[in-house]
Amino acid sequence: MKSVVRMEAGVRVSLKFRINCGLFKITIRLSFSTRIKLTFVIGRDHPQDAPWYCGGATETLRIGPAPRMSLMEAVRLYAVAPNFAPLATPAEGQLPLDIFFMPQLSISGEPPAVKEDQAAVYSINLFISKELKTHDDET
């Protein structure tokens, strides 16, 4: 992994000399400033060592813009009825469940042709777990 380090330093100096000659005074003013910028890299990237690197052999996936439709149209087209069979009540009569509600902020219209076509959307996720707890706070 590489790290880019940027440093910037500056100095400003002002001087004022006043010479009194009796009949007249001489004033000399001097000032200057300077700024130094330095950028350097520590380390280097090794993309071939990344677990997702495939040697550049994959093609770029081209997806057209998402179709514009109302929420109800999208539900009718894409919604799938959930399968609750694994969560059926056991013979003992009770099944403790942990349910996690996780809204995720995203952007619609991938890839956007124009930034103005992007819209912020929330994707709602429900995760249901019926794992038996081994301790009070572990699943």
Image (tube, rainbow, N blue to C red):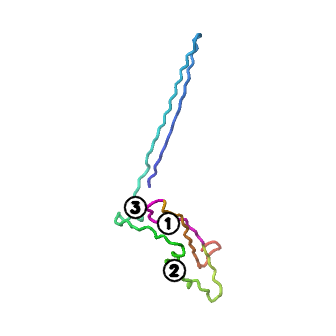
Q: Nearer the viewer, mark 3 or mark 1?
A: 1
**Mark 3 burial class by Cα count in 10 Å: few <14, some 14-19, many 20+:** few
Kindly report the distance in space between the C-alpha atoms of the residues bearing marks 2 and 1.
20 Å
Compute the Cα span from label 3 to label 1.
Answer: 32 Å
* Residue wearing tag 3: 49
- First of labels 3, 2 by sequence position: 3
**Between 1 and 97, which is closer to the camera in this rendering?**
97
Q: What stretch is highlighted in magenta?
A: 101-115
> Is 126 placed above or below 37 here?
below
Q: What amino acid is found at the position of numbered circle 3 in the picture?
A: Asp
According to the image, label 2 marks what residue? 80
Amino acid bearing label 2: Val
The answer to whether residue 114 is magenta is: yes
Residue at 62% x, 78% y is: 97
| Residue occupying the point 51% across, 76% down | 73
Residue 100 at x, y = what percent?
60, 73
User: Label for residue 15?
Assistant: none
- Depth check: 35 or 73 in front? 73
